[in-house]
Amino acid sequence: MGTKPTKIAVLLTGILASSASISMSTFAAEAESATIDETITVIGRSENSPMNIAANVNVIDAAAIEMSGATSLTEVLRGQSGIQISDSNSGAVFSMRGFSASQAANNTLILVDGRRLNNIDIAAPSINAIPLHQIERVELLSGSAGVLYGDQAVGGVINIITKTPNATGGTLQLSGGSFNTYEAKADVAGAINDTWRYYAAASYNQGDNYREHNANETSSILGRLQYQGDNDDFFVETSYYDNDRELAGSLTLDQIEDDPRQANPFNKDDYQHEMTTAIRSGYHYQISDAWKLGLDANYTDTKVTSVSWGSPGKNNRSMLEVLPKAVATYETAKGDLNIVTGIDLSRGESEFSWGRSNVQKVASAYAQATVPLTTSVSYVVGGRYAEVSDELVDGAVYPQGVDLDQDAHAFELGLNYRPNSNHRLYIRADDNFRFAKVDEQAYTPKDVVGLKPQTGRSYEAGWDWAPEQHSVRISAYQLDLEDEIVFDPNAETPPGGSFPGANVNADASSRLGASIDWDWQLASQILLGIEYNYIDAEFTEGVNKGNKLSWVAEHSGRGFFSIDANENWQVFTELVYTGERFIEGDNGNVAPKLDAYYLTNIAINYTNNDWLASLRVDNLFDEQYVSAGYYSSWGAHGYYPGTGRALRLSASYRF
């Protein structure tokens, strides 16, 4: 596949020229002093403050993670920023802005320090491969980010920022709890000399988990070497993740009512063993007061062996990314003019044991400029053009192979009004797109050779207000999609297909939503917060016009309360609500809705100098609920029970 230089050149030139022409008169002016926000984010592929970005951004820092007593990212993210979770007892999938469970992994982009966790196939990214003790903060961008990140940044972006070796010391942590769970974590950082530093981390976890035949053994190790000069910086990092887990299979509602912990007898030999090696490296150079150049490269190699419903399988997949970019900041009398532009190149390969393989190459160019109009008003404009090629082989559908070439583009326009350091309003429109995965392209109805790229546009408006003791975020949005890539159980089965249905480009759909998030520091020792999210997600065309999208709860929310009893003791309580919804795949809305449910979590934390101990109880009242479910036109729906009450006691020491 070759890129089209004319289209890319026109895109970049047009965006940068329009921004520069509007702001040319400000370059010669002296910069005024500006208020620096305490929280810095890299959403936007450059450092900035959430209040300066025309988007709905929430940052969960290390202090908030520690306060919650959570032991996994799934616990941290549940209910945050409208995230709805599906878990088939083998790993959670995170949905933002109203996507079904099977599509959430393809429409929510998950990054670790800018490296994509999303896979070339439809397998969900292993988000718990990053232990909590390695995380500095988690950045959540709700809504489309097609210009900045391209493919799959449809409902939102979860960017996990890990610790860097800026200090000397480390942490040791041991924990244990329900279902024979035991875990050990450690990390250490230090200086080699004035410019070189190191960081290393390791973790090990084993447990039986809630259900029978669902035990896991998980380990990870990471090493990082970092150089920081006066005008440049460099790092190289390598990591290994190993997760071996038994799969308990789905149940009927009657089986869940009888015993939610039982395993499906037809899945007594099922398991999945995933081993991932990742290498990251980056070099950044400040070539002038305004411009900084960077080049990042990432490579991951994953080997998966499994048995699913009695059938063994293997999947080897790899991903190489090369990401050059240039970032500029011009100080002006009206504020900072920020420019970020770059090229994203990737080559992914996936090979299955049953005769299916694919090599997917993506090349795209993007540019975005944030331009000050006054000292309190700025606008953002940007665009991206992307091309993808697939070299697809499938023993049943494409035994001789087929080559697919497609392209997509995205544009963005936003306005940010910030009258002071703790108050802002914004409006924003952003395009989004995603390309079909190898599994999806290889299982389509007869005479459908290649699914169209999914495209859409998001409109959003929001208000943030953060006085001394409060923080309020309100937003409303509309997300319209065309040619959404979904699996339809009623579609024509491909020639040689082993199960009914096929992947299709669905009818148009729309998601209307609103959210409110309020945190209140009631007193120096008391913090409380409330979040509510509303989504009206339905088909707007075709035979299902007016029907609700499956697995999308119209109402969801979260509330928490934290109190510091004294300088040593803290109590944290959390209530997460998920409303009723149709089972996954029930596009005709014919099956009864799944019941709404509440999950109550509590943590008691004790700190004494460098020691920290925490007791966390998830699902305190042992609520019985369905964490994932799949519709069948034959009536044999499959359900996965959510985890019952679980206790975890942790102790850590910082040195």
Image: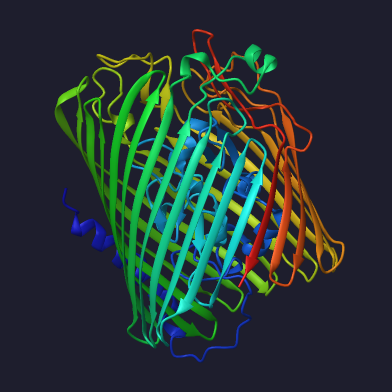
**Image-based side of 127 in relation to 383, left or right:** right
- In the image, residue 583 above or below residue 180: above
**Image-based side of 339 in relation to 564, left or right:** left
**Image-based side of 172 in relation to 302, left or right:** right
Q: Nearer the viewer, residue 475 or 389?
A: 389
Residue at 67% x, 53% y: name it: 650
**Image-based side of 415 in relation to 232, left or right:** right
* Rendering colour mode: rainbow
Q: Position of residue 212 (x, y in %)?
A: 58, 25
Q: Quadrant of the C terminus?
A: bottom right
Q: Could one spot residue 609 in this view of the protein?
A: yes
The quarter holding residue 46 reads bottom left
The residue positioned farthest toward the top in the image shown: 634
The residue positioned farthest toward the left in the image shown: 400
- In the image, residue 264 above or below residue 15: above
Q: Position of residue 600 (x, y in %)?
A: 76, 40
Q: Position of residue 352 (x, y in %)?
A: 26, 31
Residue at 72% x, 35% y: name it: 645
Residue at 51% x, 33% y: name it: 90
Q: Position of residue 14 (x, y in %)?
A: 32, 65
- In the image, residue 194 above or below residue 339: below
